[in-house]
Image (cartoon, rainbow, N blue to C red):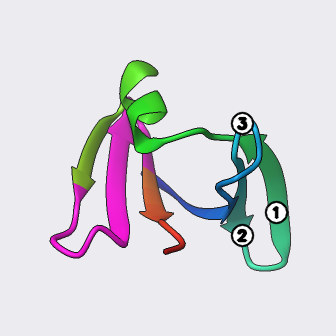
Amino acid sequence: MASIVIHRVDTQAIPPLAVIYDAPGDCLHIWCETLANLRKQGFVVYEDLEGKYATATGGDIELEVYIEQ
């Protein structure tokens, strides 16, 4: 499975900005409002107890999500 890190950068933006780092030194910018949006897109989202990290799995893609507090 591919492993991608999503880092929520600006939660006040409309929609909030997220940056996907898909390899060291490479980054792609996408819009990602909430983890609920990932769920709407068909991902199964598992959150940790502290709410700082989550794993979202959809098809053959697994997203490792870090949520900025």
User: Amino acid under label 1?
Assistant: Cys
Residue 23 is covered by the magenta coloring:
no
Instruction: List the residue tagged with mark 1.
Output: 27
Q: Is residue 68 left or right of residue 59?
A: right
Is 13 on the left-hand or right-hand side of 69? right
The crowding category of the residue bearing disc 1, from other C-alpha atoms within 10 Å (few below 14, some 14 to 19, many at least 20), is few
Give above or below for 69 relative to 29: below
- Residue drawn at x 70%, y 52% is 12
Q: Residue at x 72, y 36 (%)?
A: 15
Instruction: Report helix, strand or loop for mark 2.
Output: strand
Mark 3 or mark 2: name the one nearer the start of the chain.
3
Q: Position of residue 65 (x, y in %)?
A: 46, 61
| Distance in Å between CA atoms under marks 3 and 1 | 19 Å
Q: Which residues are magenta?
A: 47-62
Residue 15 is tagged as 3
The amino acid marked with disc number 3 is Pro
Q: CA distance from mark 3 to mark 2?
A: 24 Å
Q: Is residue 2 above or below residue 27?
A: above
User: Which residue is identified by label 2?
Assistant: 23
